[in-house]
Image (cartoon, rainbow, N blue to C red):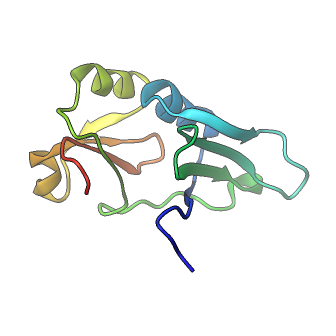
Amino acid sequence: MIEANTHVRIARPSRDLAAAERFYVDGLGLTVLYKETDPAEGEHELLMAGLPGAGWHFELTRGPSGTVVPSPTADDLFVLYLGRPVEDALIDRLTEHGGERVAAHNPYWDQWGVTVRDPDGYLLVLSSRSWG
């Protein structure tokens, strides 16, 4: 049975885990929870990032020879509800670490936050709204 405290994993493929780590860890401020950069033959490289003690983590993988290529759409969003205005310093840090600020596909997100494209083309939305 799924409960409110069920841990959530958000997983995506990545072309370049080092670039993804710079963006999500150095830029956004997540913590590396686990990393595998030298997997056994046929296994995946892996970066798990999140916040210690949180009920979720973000997992980026790179299969043998890049077997799965990221293919983000305009609605593949990773939304963080900050509950406060998005600080310019955070946006600057994200762009300095490989991100690109972009207009949102859905204008709702431009009204209530900032959208940044990560190095693999996926969209991170920093929402000024609160959740719940």
Q: Position of residue 7 (x, y in %)?
A: 57, 60
Left or right placement of residue 42 versus residue 60 in this view: right
Q: Position of residue 126 (x, y in %)?
A: 28, 42
Q: Vertical placement of 109 versus 117: above or below?
A: below
Q: Residue furthest bottom?
A: 1
Q: Vertical placement of 125 versus 22: above or below?
A: below
Q: Residue at x 22, y 32 (%)?
A: 86
| Total marks in image | 0
Split into 4 quadrants, where in the image is the C terminus? bottom left
Q: Residue at x 20, y 57 (%)?
A: 105
Q: Nearer the viewer, residue 12 or 55?
A: 55
Left or right placement of residue 76 versus residue 48 in this view: left
Left or right placement of residue 42 versus residue 72 in this view: right
Q: Vertical placement of 48 versus 88: above or below?
A: below
Q: Vertical placement of 82 versus 6: above or below?
A: above
Q: Position of residue 109 (x, y in %)?
A: 17, 51
Split into 4 quadrants, where in the image is the N terminus? bottom right
Q: Position of residue 22 (x, y in %)?
A: 53, 28
Left or right placement of residue 124 versus residue 1 in this view: left
Q: Residue at x 85, y 46 (%)?
A: 39
Q: Nearer the viewer, residue 132 or 40?
A: 132
Residue 102: quadrant of the picture: top left
